[in-house]
Structures are given as C-alpha cells and as structure tokens.
Amino acid sequence: MPLTNAEKQKRYRERKANQGKKEVRGYLSEQAQDVLTELREQTGWDDSTILSNALRLTYAAQKCGQIKLLNNWLTKHQK
C-alpha cells in the first residue's frame, strides 16, 4: 500500500533526526527574505546550508566580540 504524504514526511523527518539533524522553523522579515534571495543567487546554497552557516557565523562573531559591530553594519546598510 502506498504511503500518504504525511507518512512520507514523517519518515523523512525521522531519517534526518537519525542523521543528527534538527529542524528549525521561523519567519523571516522582508529584509531577511531579500538577503536570503541574494545569498542563494551568489552562493548556490540551499536553505539548510544558509541557515547552518548563518548560525555558525553568528556564534563565531559572538565569541569574537563582534556581534555589536555586525549588527550596527546591518542597521546602517538596512539589511
């Protein structure tokens, strides 16, 4: 008997969880959507890669004491 879409999605999520991956959900502001589109075009990365790299880079900036500097740049450039 063929699987329903819900069953396929559940199996997909279970496989990803078994690979040690975690799903993260959220809503993007208009500015973030524009940035996402630009990043996709420039890098060829998918959403998962962009999100993973964004979190890692944010963590590195925080550890290096650069969060305020980067946030000020984003504000100044309306990004």
Image (spheres, grey):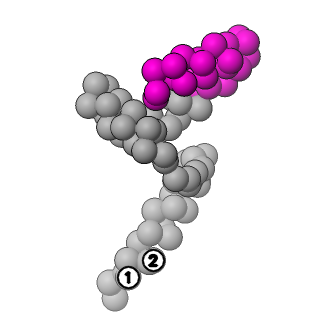
Q: Is residue 28 magenta?
A: no
Read off the residue under disc 2: 7
1 and 2 marks in contact (CB < 8 Å): yes
Q: Is 64 located above or below residue 36 in the figure?
A: above
What range is drawn magenta here?
56-79
Asked if residue 10 shows in the view, the reply is: yes
Q: Nearer the viewer, residue 10 or 48?
A: 48
- Percent x, y for residue 25? 56, 54
Magenta stretch, overall SS: helix
Label 2 secondary element? helix
Q: Residue at x 46, y 62 (%)?
A: 12
Q: Quadrant of residue 2?
A: bottom left
Mark 1 crowdedness (10 Å alpha carbons): few <14, some 14-19, many ≥20:
few
Q: Nearer the viewer, residue 22 or 70?
A: 70
Label 1 secondary element? loop
Q: Nearer the viewer, residue 23 or 41?
A: 41
Mark 2 crowdedness (10 Å alpha carbons): few <14, some 14-19, many ≥20:
few
Read off the residue under disc 1: 4
Asked if residue 49 shows in the view, the reply is: no
Q: Give the residue type at disc 1.
A: Thr
Q: Is 49 located above or below residue 77 in the figure?
A: below
Residue lying at the far bottom of the rendered structure: 1
Q: Is residue 7 left or right of residue 40?
A: right
Residue 65, numbered label = none
Q: Is 10 located above or below residue 64 in the figure?
A: below
